[in-house]
Amino acid sequence: MISVRVYGILINEQRQVLVSDEFIRGNYYTKFPGGGLEIGEGTRDCLKREFLEEMNLPVAVGRHIYTTDIYQQSAFNNAHQILSIYYEASALEQITVPLRTKPFDFDEAQLKLYESTRQVETFRFINWEDFSADVVSLPLDKIAAGIIKQTAP
């Protein structure tokens, strides 16, 4: 089974990169915002939906950055192969969700939610000077981070 995932790399006016810190099934991940493609959905529409669902943030989807060109097994299901697609994204409105300044800074309400969903996330910006492939957890995110670091103006 192939799982198609779509992620956005959002760099704000201060040259900071948005990441999502997630606690999923007992493991911590820092990754780019995004998620799974649904049946009947295009990749750009998927990314717009994911930003709305996760951050209540309308975004414009920009240039294509990277599509998986290697085999990547899912971190969550050994029977699944991951195909990830990365795009630049830009906010069309001001970000209203709480932004954290340190990794995995979940509040009490989020931790309570984890008890039922086994997943919780929060968002933060990383300064461009501190951003690299080392700040994200997943192998494909590391590739995309390296590309954006090399190609961003």
Image: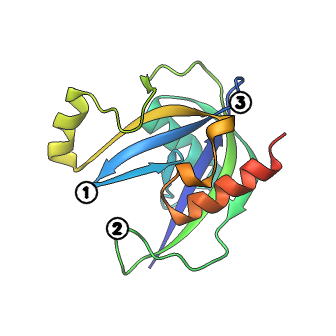
Regarding mark 2 in the picture, which secondary structure is present there? loop
The residue that label 1 is drawn on is 25
Regarding mark 3 in the picture, which secondary structure is present there? loop
In the image, what residue occupies the spot 26% across and 28% down? 107
Question: What label sits on residue 76 in the rendered view?
Answer: 2
- Kindly check if marks 2 and 1 are in contact, taking CB atoms under 8 A apart as contact: yes
Q: How many labels, in total?
A: 3
Rate crowding at label 1 as few (under 14), some (14 to 19) or many (20 or more) other CA atoms within 10 Å. Answer: few
Tell me: residue 146, above or below residue 69.
above
Regarding mark 1 in the picture, which secondary structure is present there? loop
Q: Nearer the viewer, residue 113 or 1?
A: 113
Q: CA distance from mark 2 to mark 1?
A: 9 Å
- Kindly check if marks 1 and 3 are in contact, taking CB atoms under 8 A apart as contact: no
Which residue type carries mark 3?
Arg
Image x and y of residue 40, in percent: 54, 59
Seen in the image, is 61 located left or right of residue 29?
A: right
The residue that label 3 is drawn on is 15
Of circles 1 and 3, the one toward us is 3
Seen in the image, is 97 located left or right of residue 133?
A: left
Seen in the image, is 28 located left or right of residue 118?
A: right
Direction right: furthest residue = 153
In the image, what residue occupies the spot 45% across and 34% down? 123
For marks 2 and 1 on the same chain, the one whose residue lies earlier in the sequence: 1
Quadrant containing the C terminus in the rendered view: top right
In the image, what residue occupies the spot 57% across and 46% down? 47
Q: CA distance from mark 2 to mark 3?
A: 32 Å
Of circles 2 and 3, the one toward us is 3
Which residue type carries mark 1?
Arg
For marks 1 and 3 on the same chain, the one whose residue lies earlier in the sequence: 3
